Image (cartoon, rainbow, N blue to C red):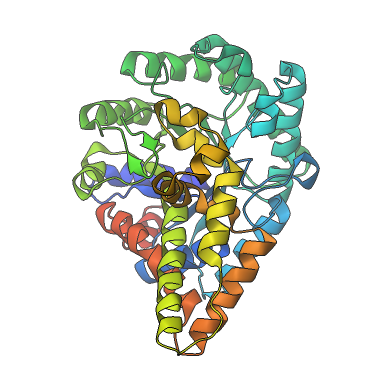
Amino acid sequence: MKTPIKSTVKALLELQEENKSATLLGIGPMSKNLLQASFELARDYDFPLMFIASRNQVDMDELGGGYVNGWNQFTFMEAIKEIAVKTNFNGLYYVCRDHGGPWQRDKERNDHLPVNEAMALGKKSYLADIEAGFDLLMIDPTKDPFEVGKVIPLETVIERTVELIEYCEQERKARNLPEIGYEVGTEETNGGLTSTNIYETFILRLQEELDEKGLPMPTFIVGQTGTLVRKTEQAGQFNFENAYELAQMAKKYGVGLKEHNGDYLDDVSLLEHIPSQITATNVAPQYGTEETRGYLKLASVEQKLKDYGLIENPSKLRDVLLYHAIQSERWRKWMVGDQTELTVDEIMNDAELSTAILDIAGHYTFNLAEVKKEIDKLYANLNQVNINGQRFIVEHIKRPIRDYVECYNLQGATTRIKEKL
């Protein structure tokens, strides 16, 4: 039987006291290539994996499915199991819902669904997570479209959080399924859980409400450590003191501090994570961007091979990726200032901005039939000259993940955790 994620986090908190701990890495599952890269690294470096899927990425077909491989909760789990077998991985991995709950699909938020309807859809999605076998559910009712630009009252967040945990626990127990973990809180920089005072107030009030209903404390509470992703860079500033204080506060209650927006951190900031005692970090868009960059490098090689007369008919992968990345409009959430309001036509007519959008949003298009067709053609062309394109992509994705593995003291972490349990 798999070690519950709550037990793994408890072991990590104890290992922190012995200076033997690690910071877990939550990986946004952008593609099968990323899953393969993750499993191969975790196999070779002996650390636990966490795959963190948002509702836009993986969800029920009737709610719109997900943009990542068209996966719903069950096909996502099947793909993970398939790749674990393919890579001979027999360590620990956890499948996690990132930002579950009401209004967490873009359409639900844009449609301004009333609270009752949004909560019902959030619960329906959680039920599929539970039945599919997810190990951790993030309970996030903070994307309220009626509170845009405002800080949602703490009591409202707590009330909705408790309601959702109670629902999930009832449904889990009714199906006699194993214990799952919960993640709560928000990473928002404007009014999120930034100061230790607000953080502790949140924990205490949440504990009070959960205890009253006989519900478990969460495994992770998200806290703001200064990180912020914009475009394809870390636009925030990692705050060691804040991170350390929040981590100690969470540990008092047997909970791990979870950091979001951990993409594109430099080595100095990454190395600060172990002494700051952050228990886990989420990284998602960076790894999708790395895969896009890998494809563009292969497309450049392919063009050179045509110039050398070694292949006749190159793919149109770059052009197809570029067009669909811009048309997706999913880049808007990562832009800054007036750029969030640019029209598709304005971007299409600006070569420099188009290239930047491709870097940001290429990974949102990987599941489109036209993109898949060009990737297959690219691979076939390169194969003619003994270049394994798919292997290059997997290794390309591994590079930034390996940086986190090394700095987060993850090598050997599974063995250390098992010895502690």
Q: Is residue 228 depicted above or below 33 in this figure?
A: above
Residue at screen point 18% across, 46% down:
268
Taking the image as drawn, is residue 265 in sight? yes
Residue at screen point 46% across, 71% down:
299
Using residue 259 as the reference point, say whether residue 33 is left or right of it.
right
Q: Is residue 285 depicted above or below 31 in this figure?
A: above
Query: Looking at the image, how many numbered discs can be counted on the residues?
Result: 0
Q: Residue at the left extreme? A: 268
Picture quarter with the N terminus: bottom right
Q: Position of residue 255 (x, y in %)?
A: 42, 33
Q: Is residue 328 depicted above or below 207 in this figure?
A: below
Taking the image as drawn, is residue 29 in sight? no
Q: Where is residue 56 in the image (x, y as percent from the top left)?
A: 63, 41
Please state which of residues 384 and 219 is positioned toward the viewer in this rendering: 384
Q: Where is residue 93 in the image (x, y as percent from the top left)?
A: 51, 57
Residue at screen point 66% across, 56% down:
76
Q: Position of residue 3 (x, y in %)?
A: 52, 53
Q: In which quarter of the image is residue 413?
A: bottom left
Using residue 173 as the reference point, say whether residue 393 is left or right of it.
left
Q: Residue at the front extreme? A: 349
Using residue 52 as the reference point, say whether residue 110 is left or right of it.
right
Residue at screen point 25% across, 53% down:
407
Q: Is residue 354 depicted above or below 154 in this figure?
A: below
Using residue 2 as the reference point, say whether residue 60 is left or right of it.
right
